Image: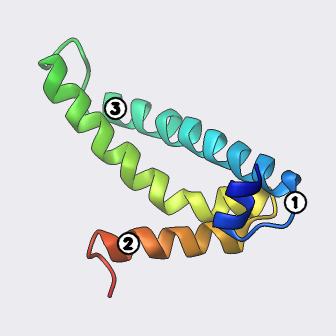
Amino acid sequence: MDKLKQRWGLTSNWEIVAILIAFSINGSFAAYIVRPTLSIIGITKENLNIVIYYILYIVPVFIVYQFTLPYTGWLVGQYKFFKNMQNKMMKRMKFKS
């Protein structure tokens, strides 16, 4: 726990727990939003090759995840941490300079 606190610049174990909770909530939320959306537009496992379906599933989940992560972090009191993490990830993927 001390290594995570030092690496992420945190001061308490509660912050680590809050961040892990935010990651898990956000991942579930992204999947919860994308699956019915794909179904509405006609993308299902039954009418597509399973590999193509999961590619078409993972890409929107990743996009929704990135946009909702700071707000989920805000719910657990860690907005600044997640906003900084999102900015760093966007820079690494060359979406932001």
Mark 2: few/some/many CA within 10 Å (<14, 14-19, 20+): some
Name the residue located 33 percent from the left edge and 82 percent from the top edge: 96
Q: Which residue is mark 2?
A: 90
Image location of residue 81, percent across then percent down: 67, 69
Foreground of the two, 95 or 13: 13
Name the residue located 33 percent from the left edge and 46 percent from the top edge: 60
Tag shown at residue 12: 1
Q: Please, what secondary structure does the residue beneath circle 2 have?
A: helix
Q: Please, what secondary structure does the residue beneath circle 3 have?
A: helix
Name the residue located 54 percent from the left edge and 40 percent from the top edge: 27
Foreground of the two, 87 or 12: 12
Residue 84 falls in image quadrant: bottom right
Image location of residue 18, percent across then percent down: 78, 51
Mark 3: few/some/many CA within 10 Å (<14, 14-19, 20+): few
Q: Amino acid at mark 1?
A: Ser
Q: Is residue 51 left or right of residue 33?
A: left
Q: Vertical placement of 5 versus 13: above or below?
A: below
For the C terminus, which image quadrant? bottom left
Q: Work out which residue is located at the far front of the displayed protein and give it.
A: 3
Q: Can the viewer see residue 66 in this picture? A: yes
The reply to whether callout 1 and callout 3 are in contact (CB within 8 Å) is no
Image location of residue 15, percent across then percent down: 81, 57
Instruction: Measure the C-alpha gap from mark 3 to mark 2.
Output: 29 Å
Instruction: Measure the C-alpha gap from mark 1 to mark 3.
Output: 43 Å
Q: Amino acid at mark 3?
A: Ile
Compare marks 1 and 3 and give the one earlier in the sequence: 1
Q: Can the viewer see residue 42 in this picture? A: no
Q: Which residue is mark 3?
A: 40
Compare marks 1 and 2 and give the one earlier in the sequence: 1
Q: Please, what secondary structure does the residue beneath circle 1 have?
A: loop
Residue 76 falls in image quadrant: bottom right
